[in-house]
Image (spheres, rainbow, N blue to C red):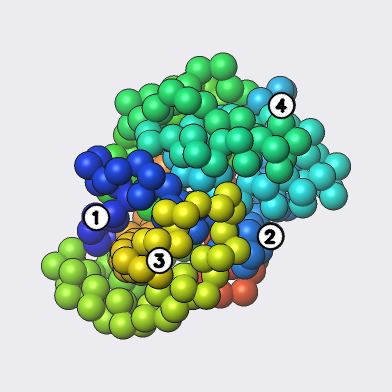
Amino acid sequence: MPAHLIEIEDLPFVPSWFRDLGTDWVRFTSERLGLYRSAVTRMAGFLQELDGRHVVDLCSGSGGGWLSLLAQLDDLGVGNVRITLSDKYPNLRSATYLARESGGRLQYSEEACDVVRGAADGADAYTMMLAFHHFPEDVAVQVLTRLTMQGRPIAIFDIWGPGVLQRFPRAIGYLLLPLALVFNIFVPLLVLIGTPRVRPFRWSRLIFTYLLPFIPLYIWWDATVSILRAYDQDGLRRIVRQADPAKSFEWQVGLTSGPGPKALSYVIGLPR
């Protein structure tokens, strides 16, 4: 079982403006690194199976890599979809930017959507990008169970976890945290270098990166904890079996073909 430490962005008392600065960074890095490039083919095949073209993206943060993903899907001729972004803590400060840059295809729901309690109705399909690792296994089963009850196709892409780490007891995972922080020591430096390029521009981003450097530390912690939380293929298959014991969906679980961290775990479910 993965070690489930707490990411700062998941804490309910964190101010929304501060949380948004972190999720903005996730979107920026995923686009600059081409993180979703290895998922384009899988996503294109998933979209081609849909009866409609309205996708509700769950746990969207600042929109993840949808801007770059839509452009790549356009190149494959399957980008004619409308995406509604949703989150328990909606990043409405980025909503206007995302809508403008996507030509209106990315719209952010102003209503808070707690996917643990249920997803929004009216979708032709659901997606979740780089967020599934935020849920402990029992909660992940609950989330996937609720999504299958909607009877709509589901596509989940996430960072992949090192399988050996996930087989350790949780206490050992905690002991490994200092080593993981040292391994990720370059993250704050990357934040300092990349911050001026993050959009939309915000003075608060500059202030809390350079004058009061809380943002680099926040991103460093969350990035490290994400590594420890991420599920391996065995863990994902176990979650799928528990969430859909009746086998009402046809499931695909695997790893996209990409170099190193650009490979993503995926769980794709289509109603039978």
Q: Mark 4 points at which residue?
A: 53
The residue that mark 3 highlights is 209
Look at mark 2 in the image and give the residue it sits on. Answer: 37
N-term-proximal mark, 2 vs 3 = 2
Q: Which residue is drawn at 61% across and 35% down?
A: 96
| Camera-nearest label, 2 or 3 | 3
Q: Between disc 1 and disc 2, whose residue precedes?
A: 1
Q: How far apart are marks 4 and 3 (CA)?
A: 39 Å
Local crowd size for mark 4, using a 10 Å CA cut-off: few (<14), some (14–19), many (≥20): some
For the point 46% across and 73% down, which residue is it?
A: 192
Q: Where is residue 93 in the image (x, y as percent from the top left)?
A: 50, 39
Q: What element carries label 4?
A: loop
| Nearer-N-terminus badge (4/3) | 4
Q: Label 3 sits on what residue type?
A: Thr
Residue type, mark 1 in image = Ile
Up-down: is 124 above or below 173?
Answer: above
